Amino acid sequence: IPTDSPTDSPTDTHCPYCSFQCGITLVAGSRPATLQPQEDFPTNRGGLCSKGWNATELLDHPDRLLTPLVRAVPGDRSSALRPATWDEALGRVVDGITASQQRYGRDSIGVFGGGGLTNEKAYSLGKFARVALRTAMIDYNGRFCMSSSATAGNKAFGVDRGMPFPVSDIGETAAILLVGANPADTMPPAMQWFDAGRAAGAQHIVVDPRRTSTAQGASVHLRPTPGTDLALANGLLHLAIREGYVDQAYIDARTTGFAAVRAGVRSFWPDRVERITGIAVDDLRRTVQILAEAPSAMILTARGAEQHSNGTDTAQAFINLALALGLPGKPFSGYGTITGQGNGQGGREHGQKADQLPGYRRLDDPAARAHVAAVWGIDPAELPRPGKSAFEMLDAIGTPDGVRVLMVMASNLVVSAPDANRVADRLAALDLLVVSDIFLSETAARADVVLPTAQWAEEEGTMTNFEGRVIHRRQALPPPAGVLDDLQLMIELARRLDRGQYFSADPRTVFDELRRASAGGIADYAGISYERIDAEQGVFWPCPTDEHPGTPRMFLERFPTPDGRARFIRVEHRDPAEMPDADYPFALTTGRLLTQYQSGTQTRRNNARMVPDPCVQLHPDLARGQGIGAGDIVEVRTRRGAARFRAQLDDGIRRDTVFVPFHWGGASNANTLTLAALDPYSRMPEFKVCAAALERVGDS
Ligand code: SF4
């Protein structure tokens, strides 16, 4: 760990939060640290949202963990957490791992990573699980975030790069269909690109059951019944075919499988789609006309469309629509998905996923195993097989098949996992829970061992933003005394497991190894170096050689499939796993607020002045029918739990739908309500719709 004192010289780095990864300049020498947005960084161009502006408050926050914590009585989680030395804390972790593996086998250890980790950490964590722990059981919170669209992208295009074009293309395209995304609140600086497009005459269609800040600026706002986006996409494709809008020359030259999809959408006639989605036929027609008649157009999806038990098929249906209109690979056109977490893109490329190795290689591919094993200096036979996906690993705890020791890095599961009460019960059944974090999150508070880690401005590494641009997170100051960087934490544990020789705590050394491990893979970083990132303000993957310019725009000539063509894939609408009924009459959906990020571990602390009350948003008519007034305390109940929120009335939301944000634990934990029905392909849980009931339990 660098021990230099922070200096007053400015450090160009990036916001610690979302996937937009705004460029900032940080001065950390005199405290409190100050920051400014970088005017010339090509994505945010001087923009920053309140989350980023307040990020320096994390650095000296009084809640910061500065020493490891262990239970006063080992194995007894009712005993208090007390400070411990690193030796004692790591000793407890290694003793627990060793005892569990001797008794129950290697796969009794689980690792749960995060989409906020740098590429170097994500890569090292995947390697740590497979080489130091030799367990198959590793997955990460991106499974709850991006996995549906990633799976759909891989199936259709042969690659998953969230946005296969730079964000500047958003300002150039003539039409956008934006489904289940609210960038005006989640990544406000991105709106400069949407605004530029609209100012130049572009038409934007927003699909969301709420009239969000983003929807307010749209040309068309479609408010479908939650859980019906797939039917919407199939219905739009039906209309595009019927009204002669498909690009047959493109379909013939660049795709396969259209005939089956054409047959599949034949039954999605407009009045049927209106019945399923609640969207008027005229609005369906207008949407298709805008997309098809524009000289360039994009379809962008995000979690609102993807976090469903049919999330992969839903993303696939929008890809089908984009392909039929001839968009992917055309200038300022295509399909993209807007990643959420800071390193949501890179976090899924380097081996944190249960079924993958670095470079987006498949763990069950013999050639991939041989390549990565050679880079790691092990026998391919030593590499475990694919393990369980995130929720399945958590849900198996307490069963003979489940992990007994869980190491959690950069994730707050008891707030962010679906059906959170069930997950909390499962965690309670572990023999040992180890959490590394910068604060005592709701999950860390339940752990046997808590390990304090360095945070964004205290570490060096790379991140891959939502465009696929690899950027440099530069270190501006050393971590506080007593805190370890996650890379050092892993090497300390690996050493104690007699596997330390395979690991490095130096980010540049790790990145060089990552480049070799990814070489020849789908996400090829071989030609990317820290020096190039600095000189070029980021480098887009794939970038296979030092001479390669990187790839801001993909699919211009071919798709990375064996035949070079994109694949249409027929998909059918199916209802959500849980539909409203007499007992639970409303559709519940969840999302983010402007000032908060993910489980709120950081943002509930770093801008305390701006933390709103946990609220439930509902239509005034629905509220009136339930005897609820603005500001009342409302208990939202589902078959899994109950949580309390203050009522916020908004006539822009559907009358049958209620919305809650997911940034709080305790009594307002939205994920105690959500449903863990999993998508069959991606294993994405159905966060975005379930059946709920409401009761007013307190006055305003
Ligand atoms: Fe930029 Fe996202 Fe940070 Fe806001 S949270 S400043 S949009 S990177």
Image: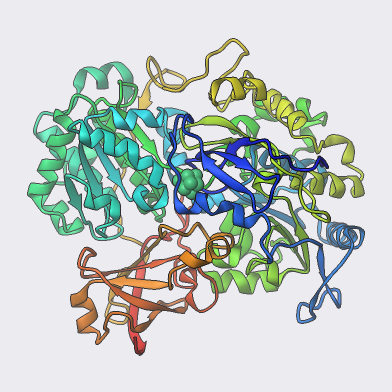
- Residue at 38% x, 21% y is 565
> Up-down: is 646 above or below 516?
below
Q: Residue at x 7, y 48 (%)?
A: 282
Q: Nearer the viewer, residue 54 or 520?
A: 54
Regarding residue 573, the answer to whether it shows in the image is: no
Q: Quadrant of the N terminus?
A: top right
What residue is rendered at 31% in x and 43% in y?
571
Which residue appears farthest toward the bottom when viewing the image?
698
To which quarter of the image does residue 318 belong? top left
Q: Nearest the camera: 563 or 456? A: 456
What quarter of the picture does the C terminus occupy? bottom left
Q: Position of residue 584 (x, y in %)?
A: 32, 78
Given residues 352 and 174, the one toward you in this image is: 174
Q: Position of residue 287 (x, y in %)?
A: 15, 41
Q: Is residue 127 left or right of residue 492?
A: left
Residue 45 in view of the camera: yes
- Check the image and report above or below for 698 versus 159: below
Please state the total of marks drawn on the protein image: 0
- Furthest residue in direction top, as rendered: 547
The image shows residue 409, relative to residue 560, as above or below, that is below
Colour pattern: rainbow
Name the quadrant containing residue 621: bottom left
Question: Toward the viewer: 131 or 449?
Answer: 449
Left or right, 5 with respect to 222, comes to: right
Name the spot of residue 39 as percent of width and height, x first: 46, 33
Please give the name of the residue rendered at 51% of the width and 58% of the height, measured from the top-left corner.
Answer: 598
> Percent x, y for residue 209?
26, 59
Q: Is residue 255 left or right of residue 560?
A: left
